[in-house]
Image (cartoon, helix red, strand yellow):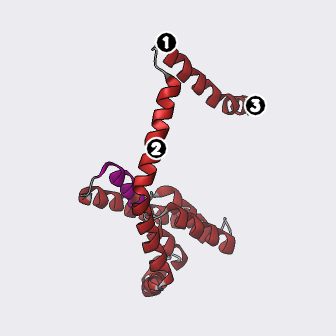
Amino acid sequence: MQWISMISIWMIPIIIAFILLYSIWKKIPAYEVFVEGGKEGIKIAISIIPFLLGMLVAITVFRASGALDYFVGFLKPLLKIFGIPSEVVPLAIIRPISGNAALGLLSDLIATHGPDSLIGRMASVIQGSTDTTLYVLTVYFGAVGIKKMGDALKVGLLADLVGILTAICIVVWMFG
């Protein structure tokens, strides 16, 4: 384990040194390129703020209106048949939309039910098996100005659904 610790300590400095030496060898002005990339990053960050703000407002309204709680209550009888705790449904719904909101829900579930409970394990596996599809599409497509994202959205949400269902099945099979 000592060598793993040494690798982790030295990996970033080695990568930076390699990049600098490579730029010297190729005669690339590394600092100027770095500064130019920083300027571009700030421009992109400013251009995506409206998209992010809209998405965060929509999430807040969805949760605060009670629509999320109503939907979970509606699904409870069906979930009970399959042995799926209804507490993980909000996480499964919010995860494709916002990573921060999903992380908050995950933290609440673990604090309430414990990390080794069925709910804690299922929520953790769902969190690790899915992506923030709507966030990714909003940020990346918005940054480059793509307005039509229909197929990417369908595939991304399908991948999230498969990840959620697979996570539930594996956790119920292993720990249920």
State the image coordinates of residue 166 (x, y, percent, origin top left): 44, 61
| Disc 3/disc 1 C-alpha distance (Å) | 33 Å
- In this figure, which residue is indicated by the disc labeled 3? 2
Relative to 54, say whether 85 is above or below. Answer: below
Does residue 176 show up? no
Q: Residue furthest top?
A: 25
Say which residue appears at 37% left-offset and 58% top-offset.
Answer: 138
Q: Nearer the viewer, mark 1 or mark 2?
A: 2
Q: CA distance from mark 1 to mark 2?
A: 26 Å
Q: Which residue is mark 1?
A: 25
Q: In the rendered image of this protein, does residue 75 appear above or below residue 116?
A: below
Instruction: Measuring from the top left, give residue 72's x and y in whole percent.
Output: 46, 82
Q: Say which quadrant the C terminus sits in.
A: bottom right
Q: Position of residue 169 (x, y in %)?
A: 47, 65
- Badge number at residue 164: none
Q: Quadrant of residue 77?
A: bottom left
Which label sits in the foreground, 3 or 2?
2
User: Which residues lie in the magenta part?
Assistant: 134-145
- Give the spatial CA distance, label 3 vs label 2: 37 Å
Which SS class for mark 3?
helix
The residue to which callout 2 is attached is: 41
